[in-house]
Amino acid sequence: MEVFMTFENLLNITPNPVFSFLIWILLALFTLYLARRPFHKSVMSFGRIIRNAMRLTANSLLLAEKNLVRRNREVLMAAGLENAERALEREFDRVETAISRNLESFPKVNRGLSEIIHKLEEDYKKSEDVPPALPNWMPVIESISKIKNSGDAVVSNMLTEINKSLNEQHAKAIESYRTDMSKRHTILNKMAAPWQQVMKHLGDMNRSIGKITDRAKRIDKYMEDYEKIRKKEDSAARTLSSSSLTQFFISGFVLLIAFGGALINFNLIALPMSEMVGGASYIGPYKTSDVAGLVIILVELTMGLFLMESLRITRLFPVIGSMDDKMRHRMIWVTFTMLAILAGVESALAFMRDRIAHDMEALRQTLAGVEQTKLATSLIPTVGQMIMGFILPFALAFVGIPLESFVSSARTVLGVVAGALIRFTAFSLRLIGNVIYYLCRCVVNIYDILIFPTIWLGSLFGSKGTKSSKSKKKESFKDSGKIGVVDREDMATENKV
Amino acid sequence: MKKSIVFIIMMGILLAGCTETKKHTKGVYMLLDTSGTYALELQRARSILNYLLGVLQPGDTLAVATIDTGSFSEKDIIAKVTFDERPSVANNQKRAFMQKLENFVSAVKSSPYTDISGGILQAIEYLNEAGTGKKYILIFSDLKEDLAKGHVRDVPFRLSDFNVIALNVTKLRQDIRDPKLYMLRVEDWRTKVEGGGGGWRVINDLERLDNIFAK
């Protein structure tokens, strides 16, 4: 009401309210015109402060992001180097094993080959004994054939005898030749088997050498990758990063499965644990029996981790990995024994659980007033639970493998996510800063639009004034160029930032 | 060496201190009205008690007492038990408890008067002594108090941390004629219980017994 009265009073400064209103408008415009420059300066300063603050923050964030990316890259490269070293080490081990195995068998193969070759030589020498050729009958026959049959019976008989004995001798000679040739062929035939043995030995050697060659090629590839990582090439970083992401998701999935296993394990032992530690005591808000069950599972997991570590399958605890072999073997046996004991305990607990569940079910039926059905007496569920109770701890022991992958890849993935978040925050800050700055400029322009008559008049009088005095000209120039000056200042600041 | 022994002992004490039993246990005291015709309803009380035996856990306390002429007496307690921490032993206790109740229900005699207030006072005393974490007093009655001559029950209830639940509050003949009487009766008990700092609920549908421990 008071405000209304005041407003009414304001309109009563002249008899005509419209005239009074106009006077007030003019006064307001004049005042706003006078306050124009300070207003512009303050609004633009505010905009600049916000924008610059945002930009500075964004810049420092981007700097931090750069450091993070660099650090991530270093970690990634270090992990990659370690993996490559492990792969190389493994390949060298395999090559060493293959070579030692082959070299071990080499004297035997060599001896075998020598024996076979010696035998072959002997056989060859035997086969070298060329059977006596047929006697050189031809010249004799030729000379005899030149004897003319003069019809003499003696000569004729003699020739017939000669022919007969010749034929006999010839048949004998051919028979002998054939026998010798047959012997030679038999010897040569026997040589085929040693030759096959030689071929087999040589084939085996060829295969072994081929395997070693393959491994050598693989080692070459690993060495190439290793070199790339060592040189910190971008392609290596990309490969390692993508490999890390894959590892992260796969190991995460396997860990989820393991978590499911642990949960089932927990349910198997939580109820019977209440029979051991009591079902009414609590540690904080949790039942002591539940906590005890959880502790057993965690101890099993720990034993599993130590076992994997002792077997040098994982490398989460360098202390265990660097132990001497004797100590490490002891550790393997200790952890395995403890794991087996815990598995036995779990199996017993699973049996107890089955009994308690039976008892509870019987009680429930009694309380419900229903006729007690004969509860399943089959041993299959009991035995099944016991087997599960025994196997699950050993299955959980392998959780160390995906855990190691998860931990190592999570570092990279978290780094990437953190980098992306920082970049997004920096972008958002710059965006907010710019939006505020341009809003301020917008406010300045709206202000000028509201008082445009006074600005117009001001520039009009200002331009007349320029004709009268130089100093006024300067003032007027300054006034008319105010926005321009502010804009230029802003542009300069923007460029600097 | 001494330091480490002291440390281990301290840790043991600390862990032992962490194990709380009483805080999480429930104490249930059920009052059974045996006056007049309500005694006939006791068969229904059996189903409630069976439900309670089914849901109560090792470490919980359960007591059942009658509401008769003078209920402020330990003699009115029919059966009481604090279940053992081991589930197997607790199951046997439940069986024994159930047997006791069956014997009682089959041989119950109706009483001429109804001393509900005395029963509540007895319940408060018993549950406070038991020291359970959560305390429930279940009143299986029509809530019509009828004190014998000379019985004074103007003692205010101290029911902070108590939940008082009226079960199966049957409507009497006069309630059917004038429901206001029933409402006034229930409201009167609510005022008494809430005035003593306790929580008050009425469960007439015995199919919704799970609401007993809902809060």
Image: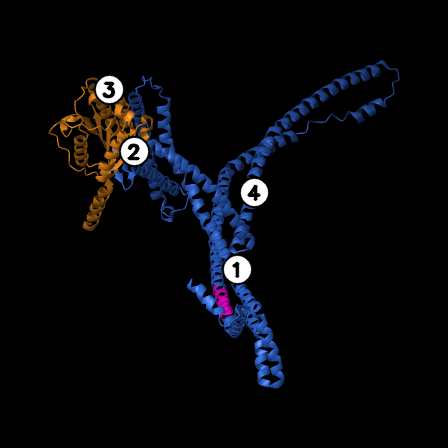
Chain colours: A blue, B orange
Disc 3 marks a residue whose amino acid type is: Leu
User: Which disc is residue B213 wearing?
Assistant: 2
Check disc 3 and report the residue beneath it. B40
Horizontal relation, residue A306 to residue A427: left or right: left
N-terminal-most mark, 1 or 4: 4
Q: Tell me the magenta residue range.
A: A42-53
Report in which chain the residue with disc 4 lies. Answer: A
| Relative height, residue A236 to residue A357 (above, below) | below
Q: Residue furthest left?
A: B150
Check disc 4 and report the residue beneath it. A214
Marks 4 and 2, how far apart in space?
A: 72 Å
| Relative height, residue B17 to residue A130 (above, below) | below
A425 is within the stretch colored magenta: no
Q: Residue furthest right?
A: A150
Marks 2 and 3, how far apart in space?
A: 26 Å
Report in which chain the residue with disc 1 lies. Answer: A
Report in which chain the residue with disc 3 lies. Answer: B
Coordinates of residue A276 in the picture (x, y in percent): 25, 32
Do marks 1 and 4 share a chain? yes
Residue at coordinates 83% horizontally, 25% vertically from top-left?
Answer: A143
Check disc 1 and report the residue beneath it. A431
Do marks 3 and 1 share a chain? no
Do marks 2 and 1 share a chain? no
Marks 3 and 1, how far apart in space?
A: 79 Å
